[in-house]
Structure formats: C-alpha cells, structure tokens
C-alpha cells in the first residue's frame, strides 16, 4: 500500500489532505528528512509534524467511558469519539466499540478496527466474563443471587433464558454482577425483573482486564499481553 493511502486510512485526512501534508513538508522520517508520497519506508519510521504515526490497523483501545457519552459516531450530544484523537473516528477500517455501554453507564469500553477480533470478543460462544458494579434504588430482597445463577431467568420480550450470572452483594443496595453474555440493557433489565431499579452502573472488568488506573475520560492502546487478559479467566 502506498504511503499516502496508508496515512489517509489512519484518519489523518482525505488523500487530498494528506497530499497537502506532503507538499508542506510536514511528513518526514525519524531523522528529520522530508518525505514524498512515493517514499518506500516502514510506517514506524514515518513522522508527521515530528510525531510518530498512530498504531496500524489492528488497533485496540481501552477507554474509561464516563456517564453522559454515547457509543456512536452520529448521535446528538457527547460521543465517545470526542474523548479520542479526532482522526480516530475517520480510520479505515472504522474504530468501533466492542459491544456498547449506554449513555448512563460508565466504565471499561474496548474499541477496535479489527472486525475479526471484535466478533471473537462479543461472540456468545466466547462467554467472556464482564464485571459490573451497580447501585440500586431499593434494598435487595434476598433471592437475587439464586435467581440470576439459576440460568432460568427470562427477560421481558425474550424467548431464551439468560446464562447463569454471579451476584456478589457489597451493601444492601450495591452489588457486583458477572455476566457471560451481552444482551441489550441486560443488567438494568435483570434487576427490573426483580422489581428493582439500577440508579448507577459501571463496568469494571472484561475477562481479566481492568481499568488499571485509567481515569474517567482517558484511554490507552492495548498490547498483546492486554488482549490475553481479555480472554483469560479472572
């Protein structure tokens, strides 16, 4: 792939935009030499305004999503892409959320431009554990752990029971819930089925991967060892 197209696919602009970057001498190598668009050079050695290029296709990002942001590129209001470098939303392939957190849910969100990896993580067959912390409007009634673990709970408008889920009680109105699937608004609907209401929801962990010091609104790119933790049991 030509260098111009490669840089454009990373989201730095249209091909016309990237051509202008070359013309203005803003693209060079690690030694400060200006490059032209026909240069044959490893992407790792390319610099734009002195900065290394973004990671190549296969990028996986961990984002600590705050409440109030939507997992979309087009919805009105604040979007998760507002928390990332602007060019990330223009990468080709697209950098997409791996599953979604609704606007009112915070916590660990993965994004990737690797479609195969995305489907491997979200596949029901993978049964990757997702750990949530929830605050409730009412005290627990006492039978929720057994109900969720039974594998027989049927959510409204669905025909397939939920997989067994593990509930740890942290306080009368605070719990940690571990799921092995990802249905629409699943945690909220599970507690609604018990007559309760989730007032705050946070995803703390996926597989054995945690936020590990990433503050709300911040992100970091994952490496191979991080991905191993996604698929590892905690």
Image (tube, rainbow, N blue to C red):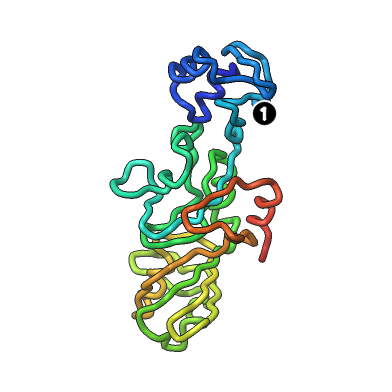
x then y, percent, for residue 127: 58, 60
Counting other residues with Cα less than 10 Å from the Cα at mark 1, is it few (<14), some (14-19), or many (20 or more)?
A: few
Return the residue nearer the eye: 167 or 90.
Answer: 90
Q: Going by the image, does 193 lie left or right of 51? A: left
The local secondary structure at tag 1 comes to: helix
x then y, percent, for residue 92: 49, 30
Q: Is residue 72 above or below residue 8?
A: below
Which part of the image, by quadrant, shows the C terminus?
Answer: bottom right
Return the residue nearer the eye: 158 or 186.
Answer: 186
Residue 45 appears in which quarter of the rendering?
top right
Q: Is residue 144 above or below residue 90?
A: below
x then y, percent, for residue 136: 39, 78
x then y, percent, for residue 21: 50, 18
Residue 116 appears in which quarter of the rendering?
top right
Which residue lies most toward the bottom here? 142
Q: Going by the image, does 175 lie left or right of 199? A: right
Q: Residue at x 54, y 24 (%)?
A: 7
Q: Residue at x 61, y 31 (%)?
A: 52
Which part of the image, by quadrant, shows the N terminus?
Answer: top right
Q: Residue at x 51, y 27 (%)?
A: 9
Which residue lies most toward the left here? 76
Count of numbered circles on the image: 1
Q: Residue at x 57, y 51 (%)?
A: 121
Residue on which the image places disc 1:
44
Return the residue nearer the eye: 152 or 70.
Answer: 70
């Amino acid at each position: 792939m030509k260098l111009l197209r490669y840089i454009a696919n990373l989201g730095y602009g249209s091909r016309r935009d990237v051509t202008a970057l070359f013309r203005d001498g803003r693209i060079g190598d690690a030694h400060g030499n200006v490059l032209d668009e026909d240069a044959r050079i490893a992407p790792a050695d390319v610099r734009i305004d002195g900065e290394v290029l973004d990671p190549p296709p296969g990028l996986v990002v961990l984002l600590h999503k705050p409440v109030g942001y939507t997992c979309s590129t087009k919805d009105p209001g604040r979007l998760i892409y507002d928390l990332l470098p602007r060019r990330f939303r223009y990468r080709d392939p697209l950098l997409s959320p791996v599953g979604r957190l609704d606007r009112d849910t915070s916590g660990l969100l993965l994004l990737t431009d690797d479609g195969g990896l995305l489907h491997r993580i979200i596949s029901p067959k993978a049964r990757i554990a997702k750990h949530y912390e929830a605050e409730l409007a009412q005290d627990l009634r006492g039978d929720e752990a057994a109900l969720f673990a039974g594998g027989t709970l049927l959510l409204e408008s669905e025909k397939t029971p939920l997989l067994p889920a593990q509930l740890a009680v942290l306080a009368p109105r605070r719990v940690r819930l571990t799921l092995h699937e990802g249905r629409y608004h699943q945690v909220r609907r599970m507690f609604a089925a018990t007559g309760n209401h989730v007032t705050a929801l946070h995803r703390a962990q996926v597989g054995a991967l945690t936020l590990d010091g990433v503050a709300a609104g911040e992100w970091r790119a994952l490496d191979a060892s991080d991905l191993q933790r996604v698929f590892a049991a905690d």
